[in-house]
Structure formats: C-alpha cells, structure tokens
C-alpha cells in the first residue's frame, strides 16, 4: 500500500538575488515498510523535498506546483491541528546534525519525556520512564536507565544519532525520513546505524525515506532508488536494476564515481563528475545534466526530457538517449 506520493512537486525560494528554483517537478512514492533512497549531489533539492513533506519549509519557501499526498490526502490541506498529529504519529524525521533535535540544556530523559508527552499528555511519570528506557534499548543505547540523566554533550555522535532515532520512534510513526543521518559519523558507526534502520524496518514495518549524497551507502539498504539532480528525479527504479543497468548518464556518472573511489561507506563528496550542479536561479530549459553530459546534443537543451518507463517494471528515466555505454 502506498503511504506517500510526491507528484510533480515544485518549490521555489524568494531570495534577495531573485527566485531560486530548488525543486522542479519531483515525483516519487514510498510504500508501507519500504526503504527508498534519494541520492544526488549537494544542492539537488533532496532536503527541500524532505522538508516539504512535513511542511517544514523555511519562511521564504514557496510551494509553486504539484502535490504531496500521504495516504491519499494532500499534506497542504492539513489544518494546524492535523499537521501536529501528522508530524510524529505518521511521519518523523531525523537529520545529519543531532543538534537540530536536542536542546543542550535538557537531559536526554527530559527530551524523551517531552516528546512522549507531546503525543500522549496522560502518561504517568512511571510510564514515561519505562517507555524512554524501552526506546533507548530498542536503538541499542547501553545502560539506558543510567543514561537518561545525561546531557547531549555527554554522548558520542553515534549514540546521539541513535537517541535521535529513539525520539523519532517515540510517536510510533509509519514513515521515517532520514536526511543524511550518518554523514557526520565515521565508517563503522555509519554501518551500525544502517543495520539499526534495517532492523527497525523489519520489526516495525517502518517505511524509510533515506536521503544521501552517497550512492554506495544507500545501495546497501534501499529497495528502490530515486536519483535526484537539479531539483528533479532523473532516474528511479529497484536498487538492483538501477545499479546493474543504469539508464541515465547522470546515474552512470554517479556509479563511476563510486567505482573510482573503490570503497563503500565513503564520506567523500562526489568529485569525479566534471563540472558543477546547475544554477538554481537560471535552470536550463532542457535536460539539467546537459552541460556535464558526455552524450548531450542540441535536442537535449530544448525541453526537459519527459519521464519514460521501460525495461523492468518501475524503472524510469528522463533522458532522450538513455542506456548507451559511454
Ligand atoms: N532557505 C533557503 N533559501 C534559499 N535557498 C535555499 C534555502 N534552502 C535551500 N535552498 C536552495 O535550494 C537548493 C536545494 O537545496 P537542498 O534541498 O538543501 O539540496 P540537497 O539537500 O540536495 O543538498 C539549493 O540551491 C539550496 O541553496
Ligand atoms: S537528455 Fe541529453 S543531456 Fe540529458 S542526460 Fe540524456 S543525453 Fe545527456
Ligand atoms: Mg541536504
């Protein structure tokens, strides 16, 4: 069953330099219990798309087109009360910087109590304590009862990220959005968090929308991949199909860049694709990848290539001459 559908979403920002086109017609869906990866270079519109799902766009963000539906209902139609219930009880989000979820002057126990009570104001002190310990156990924080009195700065980055996941689970969401949750962590700690997310999906049937610039990392856990560039999804499909038979030259360039790093769980930015991401103030009228694409020709720069589905079910791309080996 489909939980989330993003349909031709367009998000702009009003800035002193003019209108910035951050998301330019992104479409994707997430089904119950599914792990979907959004991968793409910095600036491709991944975080803005994620924030829009929870209606957490900054004040200068403008929803200028398309829709986001959760269980068939537009999130843009939710009242303030419905939005409060939706955030947490249906969809929770974790970020790269645990600092965004923690107040440094609150102990972890206090932060957990606040989150638990925000969703159920009737909980007794004993229930809050018991539930906090259970949640910390679920994400493998050692000695949870003792650690509730500690403050955020007394935890390592990896443990803090686990506690942030526990906070996100406190309201029993159906979908977890994880925006670069392991980018600041070292390689072994990253692997532990990825294992934790896989277990949570298995045990809770939790759907996860995992956002990263790291194709090698997301390929380990995602059922399907969305390759984002210039505010659009340029290729989508089952992870195995996208990896074994990438149709879009941008996906192939991303794959080549991992092969040339030759290591998994790399934190390095994707440096091997020549050129830089499109200027979001003046996006190309045609294919956003055209200025960097080795196969580009005149037709590519006229209009944005439409989404074409071909090959294995659910594998689609936006390229007019896909699947040619470079
Ligand atoms: N509050 C904002 N005001 C203006 N531009 C923004 C704002 N937030 C993000 N952007 C711009 O939107 C584009 C997409 O950003 P983002 O979604 O954060 O990229 P990603 O997460 O893929 O690295 C970028 O050009 C970024 O500079
Ligand atoms: S549409 Fe043209 S420029 Fe864009 S990826 Fe395909 S070949 Fe390259
Ligand atoms: Mg981002």
Image (tube, helix red, strand yellow):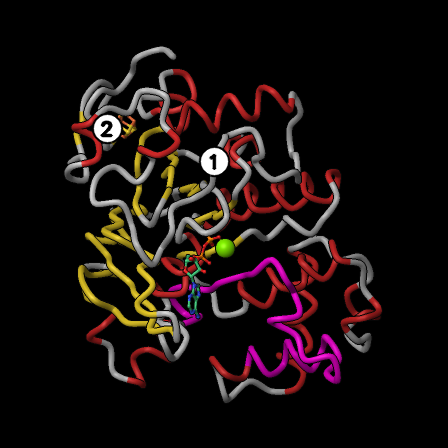
Q: Which label's residue is closer to the chain start, 2 or 1?
A: 1
x, y (%) of residue 194? 61, 42
- For disc 1, the marked residue is 275
Query: At 19% across and 27% down in the image, what residue appears?
Result: 298
Q: Which mark is residue 319?
A: 2
Viewer-closest of 43 and 30? 43
| Pointer 1 local density, CA inside 10 Å: few below 14, some 14–19, many at least 20 | few
Q: Which mark is residue 150?
A: none
Give the alpha-carbon distance from disc 2 to disc 1, as whole Å.
19 Å
* Magenta residue span: 87-116
Q: Is mark 2 within 8 Å of ligand 2?
A: yes
Residue 63 relative to residue 231: left or right: left
Do the CB atoms of the residues marked 2 and 1 lie less than 8 Å apart? no
Residue 35 appears anywhere in the view: no
Residue 77 relative to residue 145: left or right: left
Quadrant assignment, res 229: top left
Query: At 57% across and 25% down in the image, what residue appears?
Result: 258
Q: Is residue 97 magenta?
A: yes
Q: Is residue 212 magenta?
A: no
Residue 238 relative to residue 24: left or right: right
Is 267 drawn above or below residue 44 in the view shown? above
**Screen quadrant of the C terminus:** top left
x, y (%) of residue 261? 64, 24
């Amino acid at each position: 069953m489909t939980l989330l559908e993003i349909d031709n979403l367009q998000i702009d920002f009003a800035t002193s330099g003019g209108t910035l086109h951050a998301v330019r017609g992104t479409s994707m869906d997430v089904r119950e219990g599914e792990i979907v990866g959004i991968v793409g270079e910095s600036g491709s519109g991944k975080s803005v798309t994620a924030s829009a799902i929870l209606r957490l766009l900054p004040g200068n963000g403008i929803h200028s087109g398309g829709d986001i539906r959760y269980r068939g209902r537009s999130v843009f139609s939710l009242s303030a009360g419905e939005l409060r219930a939706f955030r947490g009880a249906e969809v929770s989000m974790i970020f790269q910087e645990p600092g965004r979820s923690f107040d440094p002057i609150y102990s972890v126990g206090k932060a957990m109590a606040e989150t638990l009570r925000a969703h159920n104001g009737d909980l007794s002190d004993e229930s809050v304590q018991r539930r906090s310990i259970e949640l910390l156990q679920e994400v493998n924080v050692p000695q949870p009862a003792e650690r509730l009195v500690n403050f955020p700065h007394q935890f390592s980055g990896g443990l803090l990220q686990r506690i942030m996941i526990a906070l996100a689970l406190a309201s029993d969401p159906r979908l977890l959005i994880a925006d670069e949750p392991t980018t600041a962590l070292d390689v072994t700690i990253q692997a532990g968090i990825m294992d934790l997310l896989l277990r949570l999906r298995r045990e809770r049937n939790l759907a996860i929308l995992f956002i990263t610039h790291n194709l090698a990392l997301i390929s380990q856990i995602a059922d399907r991949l969305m390759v984002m560039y210039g505010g659009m999804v340029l290729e989508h499909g089952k992870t195995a199909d996208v990896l074994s038979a990438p149709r879009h030259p941008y996906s192939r360039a991303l794959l080549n860049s991992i092969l040339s790093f030759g290591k998994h769980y790399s934190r390095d930015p994707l440096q091997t694709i020549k050129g830089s991401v499109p200027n979001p103030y003046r996006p190309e009228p045609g294919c956003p990848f055209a200025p960097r694409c080795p196969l580009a020709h005149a037709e590519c720069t006229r209009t944005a290539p439409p989404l074409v589905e071909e090959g294995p079910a659910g594998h689609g791309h936006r390229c007019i001459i896909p699947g040619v080996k470079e």
